[in-house]
Amino acid sequence: MASLTEAREAPERQLWDEIGGIHAGMLGIEGSHMHMQPMAPNADPKASTIWFFTKTDTDLVRAVGAGAMAHFCVIGKKHDYHACLAGRLEVRKDPAKIEEYWSAVTAAWFEHGKEDPLLTLLALRVEDAEIWASTDSTLRFGWEIAKANLHDEKMPDVGVKQHLAFPQFH
């Protein structure tokens, strides 16, 4: 269950924890007219960057070009946490990051392993994010709906929304 207290008091830490707990989110490039695509994130919270393995011959890499603004959307495993992150997306063949994030799952997609000529990375430098954490308690949800219906000015308190801004490193 997404902690509403953590969403209020430590939303950045919660965001990186949630990203670390999912297998994939949806990545899309602004203005490309391409649909968002499922991609497996490798989070580097200290650098506010998410790394994605991909191949150099994909439509996504061609659309990024020298760099593009992109969004990455995630839903927590229990469907009580949602986030949309935005930032600059770049194609980067970084041997240290390939080594750091390489796994058996990643290896299955690259015939020649870490030496595959099509292997590359996308780096999303996160600039800002919106998060939504909600209760998964049906009892609390029902109570909040009942209270809101009894008072015209009362809105149900079933979640937290936060906007986060991240420092940019160059």
Image (cartoon, helix red, strand yellow):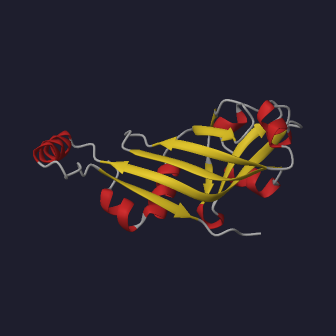
At which x and y percent is residue 2?
35, 51
Tell whether 143 sits left or right of 39.
Answer: left
Quarter that holds the C terminus:
bottom right
In terms of depth relative to the viewer, which is nearer, 41 or 140? Answer: 140
Disc tally is 0
Q: Residue at x 48, y 56 (%)?
A: 15
Residue plotted at (77% across, 46% down): 121
Instruction: Tell whether 137 sits left or right of 49.
Output: left
Tell me what residue is drawn at x 77 percent, y 35 percent. 60
Q: Quadrant of residue 141?
A: top left
Q: Which residue is more in the foreground, 69 or 121?
A: 69
- Rendered location of residue 41, percent (x, y): 61, 45
Image-quadrant location for residue 24: top right
Q: Residue furthest right?
A: 117
Rendered position, 156 above or below 26: below
Where is residue 149 drawn, in percent x and y?
14, 42
